Amino acid sequence: MATLNIKDLWVQVEGVDILKGVDLSISDHETVALLGPNGHGKSTLLAAIMGHPKYTITKGSITIDGIDLLAMSPDERARAGLFLGMQNPSEVPGVVNSDFLKAAMNARREKPLAMFQFYKALDTATKTMKIPLEMAHRPLNEGFSGGEKKRNEILQLLLLEPKIALLDEIDSGLDIDALGMVGEVISSLQKKGVGFLVISHYARLYDLVAPSRVAVMIDGKIVVSGGPEIIQKIDRTGYDWIRKELGISIEKITPSMNTTSIGICATREKTRP
């Protein structure tokens, strides 16, 4: 059983504390939804877990199966079974998408895949995602639309089958059909035991992936944890109930959004006790 454990994690960017004592665990066979207003540390948490050099960990620990992740480079964390589906995947000119995918798959194997094995897996995965195979032979993300970049992230997820997948707004920029495919891929991997930590602004994705647990982050801390009913509560009322119970103020800058919003986009970073 794979378990990612985060204990009392403090993270700085340019000397400013962004995360302020995060405690969270994610195991395989479970899906955790991470909610909270924009700018309150959700993406920072995922980047810190994967070892982004921009983020300085000043206190706390991150382990997977008891192994210290903080002692590992980002590629070693990936080989240990972590995957990050990025909010804004980078374009990498000169690196062919299929070469990147093959190298990523082989990095986690003792014996490299034979060419026919790789292309068989790639063909199956591209058909599942309804991605033209031609896209696999283009430079990585170069010239891809926002939706194509997100489909390509899920293509990587499908091919790699990590122990724990961290998905940072993987649904943004996707139309309804593409979102449905993403939901189907996640569901298929859930059945295989992959664990997920999922950030999304929309209840629709959470309806598709059925989180087993919910954590709400405000001002760099997990302030509420519980079941999926928290998603519906925030969708209906925003964060007013958290204000009243915890005395945390979050300034709203727009009216409530459409029925698929879970009230996160309509808030500005502004918290105070």
Image: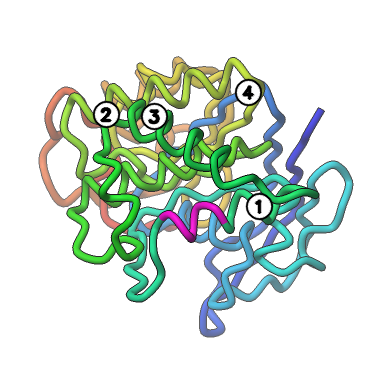
- Whether label 3 touches label 1, CB < 8 Å: no
Mark 1 lies on residue: 106
User: Colour scheme used in the picture?
Assistant: rainbow
State the extent of the magenta-drawn residues as a range.
98-102
Q: Earlier in the sequence, mark 3 or mark 1?
A: 1
Mark 4 lies on residue: 30
Distance from Cα at disc 3 to Cα at disc 1: 48 Å
x, y percentage for residue 21? 67, 56
Distance from Cα at disc 4 to Cα at disc 1: 26 Å
Q: Earlier in the sequence, mark 2 or mark 1?
A: 1
Q: Main secondary structure of the magenta part?
A: helix
- Amino acid tagged 3: Trp
- Which is closer to the viewer, label 2 or label 3? 2
User: Element at badge 1?
Assistant: helix
User: Element at badge 3?
Assistant: helix
Mark 3 lies on residue: 241
Distance from Cα at disc 2 to Cα at disc 3: 30 Å
x, y percentage for residue 159? 53, 38
